[in-house]
Amino acid sequence: MWTATAMKSLKGLKMQEKKSRQFNTVIFDLDGTLIDSFEAIREGFNATLPAYNKDPLSLAETKALVGMPLRDTFCELLGEQHADEATTIFRSRYREVFLDMTTPLPHAVETVKDLHSKGYKLAVATNKLGQFSREIIDHMGIGNCITTVVGDGDGVRKKPHPDMLIKILEEVDSTREEAIFIGDSPVDINTGKAAGVMTVAIPTGHHSHSMLEDAGAKKIIKDLSVLKKTIDC
């Protein structure tokens, strides 16, 4: 049986833990943050661009295009008049290869599972099609850890607009002060700023540490293995 003193001490510890936890929600970008799907994305582009007399892309060229909404990227590459058709061609090929050609980035799966076990609300905000994103997350074996995924086609404006983060906060019943957003690109940095959410940049996609600094990142971590320590600071 617990004594009155022991109960008081336990209650004090719980209150101290609750008080010390500034964040209760962690929102991840997907490509370049949790997953490496650059080869699958390259397949999509290279199934599309030759139809418009454009040269296939190298892996480095592909990485440089990732982050913005797909249709916007095709507007820049091919012009507004071809963007919808090109997006359809891309997604048709991507659908064929995306699960086999996508792998979790180092520390991604264990970090998500660890945060989930500690009671954090976890979500994903991505400019990848939401349908593809949810399938990838399930394929990684972390679908039960992620409360919500908001992507392209899910009824809100895409990053760098703040709408995805705002929608997630509403769905998980958290405030912007309680959330932290993890991303690998200037698009993610600008999204976090627009939403008023603390944003941590991570150079595991196309953008280096110095590129993220130049984009205005206030906090950069080397990889997901140190994320928990950052959240607890």
Image (cartoon, rainbow, N blue to C red):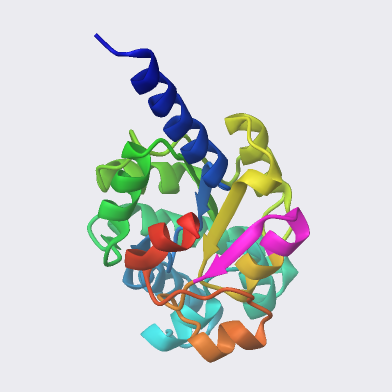
| Residue 187 higher or lower than 110, as above or below | below
- Magenta-colored stretch includes residue 193: yes
| Residue 162 higher or lower than 24, as above or below | below
- Magenta-colored stretch includes residue 152: no
- Give the x, y percent position of residue 71: 63, 62
Q: Nearer the viewer, residue 11 or 147?
A: 11
Q: Residue at x 58, y 82 (%)?
A: 212
Residue 20 in view? yes
Give the total of numbered labels.
0
Q: Residue at x 57, y 57 (%)?
A: 181
- Give the x, y percent position of residue 166: 70, 43
Residue 36 in view? no
Q: Nearer the viewer, residue 168 or 37?
A: 168
| Residue 179 higher or lower than 207, as above or below | above
Asked whether, in this view, residue 63 is left or right of residue 78, the answer is: left
Q: Residue at x 55, y 66 (%)?
A: 200
Query: Quadrant of residue 141 in the image?
Result: top left
- Give the x, y percent position of residue 184: 51, 71
Magenta part of the protein: which range? 191-201
Q: Nearer the viewer, residue 139 or 195?
A: 195
Image quarter hosting the N terminus: top left
Asked whether, in this view, residue 27 is left or right of residue 108, the answer is: right
- Give the x, y percent position of residue 148: 50, 36
Q: Nearer the viewer, residue 33 or 13?
A: 13
Query: Quadrant of residue 153 in the image?
Result: top right
Q: Residue at x 41, y 42 (%)?
A: 134
